Amino acid sequence: MNSTTPEDPTPTERFGGMMTDVLNHAALALMTSIGHRTGLFDAMADLPPSSSQEVADAAGLNERYVREWLGAMVVGRVVVFDPVTGLYHLPAEHAAWLTRSTMLINAAASAQWIALLGTVEGLVVDAFRHGRGVPYSAYDRFHEVMAEESEQTVVQALLEHILPLAPGLIDRLEHGVDALDVGCGAGRALLLMAERFPKSRFVGCDFSVKAIELARAEADRRELANVRFEVRDAADAPARESYDLITAFDAIHDQARPADVLRGVHEALRHGGVFLMQDISGSGSLHDDEAHPFGTFLYTVSCMHCMSVSLAGDGPGLGAMWGRRKALEMLKEAGFENVAVKESPHDPLNFYYICTKDRGGDPHRVGSR
């Protein structure tokens, strides 16, 4: 017996409604990215209800473009419009998620990924046919956007949330250790540690010349003598037993030779050294990943970037959602017998693997939130 009434939407109609929402939200993501890059959200956060000309003047932009952007923001329910006065207003509760000064995650900065990935769509479509990857060099603005993302998920939480996950680590850093950051990108996390822990010595490596140039320039600007940056493939292992701490923030799954990277990390650590690996909080099970709040976004980023750049280097293409089980398996194969997997309330996107190089410990010991 059919329990639907004429007023109930059919499954086809419900799916059509979902796809309508997809198109609107995708368009809103692009406009949100533009609002971030042009400084419109930052300008509006400090304005009372204003005309489109006043918003444009505050941001130093062209009024006609700003007015059309405001249209998308109004119908997207981001900006409030008063039809009587003709004035626009960004509510404080919305600005809290959209501005550079926010204490929350800046969703507008994260929206840049949608526009960035769109620039390589044609290359990814080709890759679906030939099976090879798309190289890092094809991704315009990747290091800029990644640096902003790192600032939010790593740098701002590093001292308060991330480093304390490894017991005693901050005390060791204060007394002085040798530390390496694998796949350091523009080096923001390492620069913060170099400032905070002047008795420790830091090295960052990344194969991107552009990223290392950015890191070196910032280190010079801050006049930091205890940090240096090297252009180097992370799979080229450093000297044995040369570091007390090695970090990798959202870097391992992208590698062309991730197993070699992890083996090299284990060999480069001194006895009692710590490897702190942040990586995406995939489960390794598609069924379980359906419940991940960012699952669709993460699989999309993986398909269009993480997996593809690894394949471009003849790598395995682990992908961002390689998962906890696979990560633990590879860490064990690399030689780590004492691994605690921890989560942090500040970061729903990642797991934190605290790996200690020693001769004891329970294999695959799992920490709690």
Image (cartoon, grey):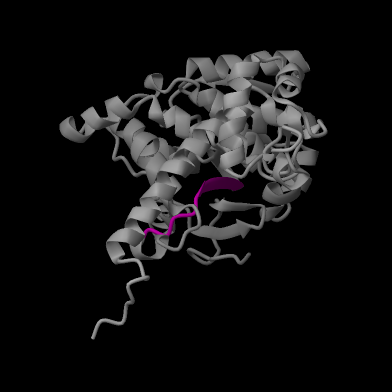
Residue 276, position in %: x, y?
A: 58, 46
Residue 312 falls in which quadrant of the image?
Answer: top left
In this view of the protein, which residue sits in the foreground, 101 or 32?
A: 32
Residue shown at the point (33%, 58%) measured from the top left: 15
| Residue 153 % position (x, y) | 63, 42
Q: Nearer the viewer, residue 84 or 350?
A: 84
Q: Does residue 172 appear left or right of residue 339 in this picture?
A: right
Q: Residue furthest left?
A: 129
Which image quadrant is residue 106 in? Answer: top right
From the top left corner, tell me how far across and down residue 278 is, in percent.
55, 46
Left or right of 339? Residue 3 is: left
Whether the magenta-drawn stretch holds residue 278 is answered as yes
258 over 20 or under it: above or below: above
Residue at 34%, 24% (x, y): give it.
135
The number of numbered badges drawn on the structure is 0
Foreground of the two, 4 or 282: 4
Q: Is residue 354 above or below residue 226?
A: below
Observer able to see residue 241: yes
Q: Please indicate, yes or no, whether residue 263 appears anywhere in the rendered image.
A: no
For the N terminus, the quadrant is bottom left
Residue drawn at (46%, 34%), measured in percent from left and top?
Answer: 114
x and y, in percent, of residue 254 in the image: 41, 37
What residue range appears in magenta? 273-284
Q: Quadrant of the C terminus?
A: bottom right
**Which residue is at the far bottom?**
1
Q: Establish if 300 lies above or below 1.
A: above
**What secondary structure do most residues of the magenta stretch adopt?**
strand
Q: Is residue 346 magenta?
A: no
